[in-house]
Image: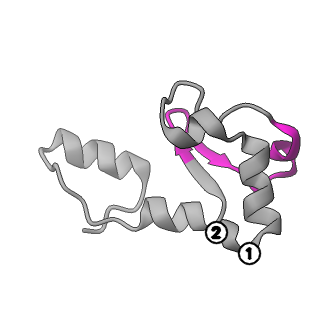
Amino acid sequence: MGVGYPLDIVVCSALGADMYDCVYPTRTARFGTALIPEGVLKLKHKAMAEDIRPIDPTSACMVCKNYTRAYIHCLVTKDAMGS
């Protein structure tokens, strides 16, 4: 409990924790931010409107395989259901 940032997850894992009760990923996603290996990706920024890359090019997940940053940007800025 109380894990509030990505670095906290890394530190807690190094200390032996293997289960978390954390709202950080969900809360940040709700506001148009994605967590990627390089840090955070703010999908609401205008620069994302025409970015046709996947959220994380190294990921094999369904979202990264099928949707672009521009599409997710559109969802979180123009579609109420996007959040």
Measure the C-alpha gap from mark 2 to mark 1.
7 Å
Which residue is depicted at the point 80% across and 56% down?
74
Residue ID at (73%, 75%)? 80
Disc number for residue 83: 2
Q: Residue furthest top?
A: 58
Q: Residues within 10 Å of mark 1 (few under 14, many from 20)?
A: few
Residue 81, quarter of picture: bottom right
- Label tally: 2
Near-viewer residue (56 or 22) = 56
Query: Can residue 1 be seen here?
Result: yes
Comparing 39 with 73, the one in front is 73
Instruction: Verify whether residue 47 appears in magenta.
Output: yes
Which mark identifies residue 80?
1
Q: Position of residue 78 (x, y in %)?
A: 83, 67
Under circle 2, the secondary element is loop
Answer yes or no: do the residues labelled 2 and 1 have beta carbons within 8 Å?
A: yes
Residue 29 locus on image (x, y percent): 57, 60
Residue 65 locus on image (x, y percent): 59, 33
Q: Of the residues shown, which amino acid type is indicated by label 1?
A: Ala
Identified by mark 2, the residue type is: Ser
Residue 42 vertical position relative to residue 23 in the rendered view, above or below: above
Q: Residues within 10 Å of mark 2 (few under 14, many from 20)?
A: some
Q: Where's residue 47, x and y in %?
A: 85, 43
Element under label 1? helix
Instruction: Answer whether residue 39 is magenta in the image.
Output: yes
Magenta residues span 35-51
